[in-house]
Image: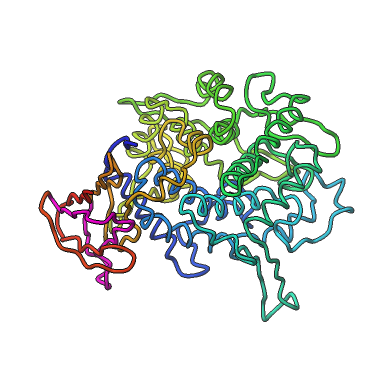
Amino acid sequence: MTTPSVLDEAQLGHLRHWDDLSRRLPHDWSGMQGKGAGEDDFGSYRFQLAYMVYGLALAHRHRLPAAPGLFRPTIQRLIEKLLMPDVWLYWRDVSRGGMVMNAHLSEGYHEEWDPVVRDNIMYSAYVQSCALLHDHLFADDRYAAPGALTFAHWSFFWGGEEKRFEYDRDSLNEHLYWQMVQNGYLGVACEPNCVFQICNQPAILGFRLHDVITGGDRATEVVAGYEKAWADFGRLDDAGHYNQMVLEDSRVVAPNALRAPWVDAWCGALMNTWNHDFVHEHYPRQVRDFLVPGPDGTIAVRSTPAMNVMGQTVVTDTCDTGWVAAWAAEMGDRATLDGILAHADRYMGPTRRDGALFYPRNDTPTDADGHRTEIEPMTGNVLLGYARLDVPDGLHELYQHPWGPEHFAEPALTEVGRDVEVSRAEVVDGVLHGRLRCRGRSGGDDDGSVLVGRVPDGARLRLDGQEVAARPVPGGLWVDVPPGPAHDLELVP
C-alpha cells in the first residue's frame, strides 16, 4: 500500500500530545476537564480517551502502517486510563435515573456499580471497541486474557468492600451482543431508557473487529437487525437530520429538534463504517446547516443555545466544532475540513509544548469581532487532531478492509523510543521506508532508537542512503537515530 503523505508538523504535534496525555500520572486529568460536572456529558474523560485511541488507530492503519511500536504503548496506556474509576464511577449515580427522560421509571432502577452490566453503552462500547482495535491492529491477544478488562474501586473512607468486575474482550463483546439481541437490535441504552443512535455505532465496530479476530459474523447479523429495528422510526427526522434517540418505554423518537451539529456529525462519522452510501448521500445537505463562513476561507461551526430543563440551564460541552471537523474528514470534504482547521488555528489559541500541539479550553464564546473562540478539551485535545490524522473514509476502510495475516509478516518499526518522531513508516514493494527524527527530550536508554522487527534474512539497512550497522537482538535490529533533521531509513531485502 502507499500512504497519503509524510506526516506534517501539526499531525506529529497531535500524536505527541496524545502520547503526553497517556503518560500522565494516575488521576491527573489536568487540561482535560470540561465545563460539565460529574463526567456526565459529551466532553468527559471516557470520550477523550476513546477517541484518542480511535485517532491513533486511524493514523496507524492509514498513515504509518509499518510503525506498530509507535502506537501500541500509547493505546495500552490510554486503555488503562479508560478502566480507571475516575472515568466510570459516574454510572453509580446515573444508573439510578432521575433525569427528565427516565424520572418516571426511577423506582425500578437501582444503584449499579458495574459500569458495563446494563445500559451505559456510552462507556461499555468504547472499552469493547478500543480493546478490539488494539488486538486487531497488533495481532495481539492482550485483552483476551481473563480479567484483562477489570473495573475496580475501593476507598478507605467509604463504600465498604472493594467493588470488582472482571471481563475480557470476548466476555464483554458477548455481553454487549446479547444486550443488543434482547433489545430487538434497536440498540443498548446510554442513560436508562435512552437508546442513542450515536452510542451504538462503536459497539457495531467492536462486533466487526471481534469477527475479524475470531472468524465470526455477528456484525452482519447486528447491522441487519439494527436496520430493521430502526426502519420503524427512520434514521432521519422530518428535516433530514439524524434522529437522536428512542425512548425504550414509549418507543417515542427524539429528533434532532435543535439542529445540534454534534448529533449529525458524530452519528455520521461513525455510521460511515457500515452505512457508507446513506451517510455520504445526506452529508452535503446536513452539514450546510451548521457552517458559518469567515474571513480568508475560515469556517466556524455554529452551536445551538444551551437547553433549559427543570428551570436549570444545562451546562455541557457540545464539541460541535470538533465533531463537524471529524465528520468532514471522514467524508473527504477537504474544503470544509481545511476551513474549520484554519478557523481553529486563527481564533482558538493553538499551543505547542515540547513538540505537542493542542488547543486549550476557552469558555469565551467569541472574540470582539464575533468570531467563535469557545473550545472544549474534547475538541482541542482530541477531535481536531483526529480530523487531521483521518483520511477520507478512514473508519469505513478500517471496518470493511481489515488487515490480514500478510500485513503482520512485513518488516516494521516494532519499538520506537520516546524521543523519536516517525513521519513515514510503510512497506512499498517489499522495502521498509521510514522517516525518523530524534528530538532528544528524554535522554533515557534507547529513547532515541527504533527496533526494526520482522527482518528478512540478508536484508540491508540504510540510513540516508548509506548502509549502516545495527545492534542485532532477538526481536530484530536496534537502530540509533542521529539527532538533528529527519533521516530516511530503508530496509532492503
Q: Which quadrant would residue 240 be assigned to in this image?
A: top right
Image coordinates of residue 283 in percent, x first then y, are 53, 23
In the picture shown, does residue 380 fall above or below 336? below
**Rendered position, 273 above or below 351:** above
Image location (x, y in percent) of residue 359: 39, 48
Q: Is residue 56 above or below residue 161?
A: above
Residue under the image location 76 percent in, 25 percent down: 233
> Which residue is rendered at x = 59% and y = 65% of the image?
84
Query: Most extreme residue toward the right, as rendered?
Result: 107
Residue 178 belongs to magenta span = no
Quadrant in which the N terminus appears: top left
Q: Using residue 373 as the reference point, say whether residue 416 is left or right of it.
A: left
Segment colored magenta:
436-464
Q: Which colour scheme is used?
A: rainbow
Q: Nearer the viewer, residue 163 or 182?
A: 182
Farthest bottom residue? 156
Q: Place residue 196 in its image quadrant.
A: top right
> In which quarter of the view is residue 429 placed?
top left
Q: Residue at x 53, y 51 (%)?
A: 50
Could you tell me residue 278's position as x and y percent?
Answer: 59, 22
Q: Position of residue 189 (x, y in %)?
A: 74, 44
* Image position of 458 (left or right of 367): left
Q: 174 or 124, which lies in front?
A: 174
Tag count: 0
The residue most toward the left is 466
Q: Is residue 447 within the magenta segment? A: yes
**Which of these two is toward me, 434 or 278?**
434
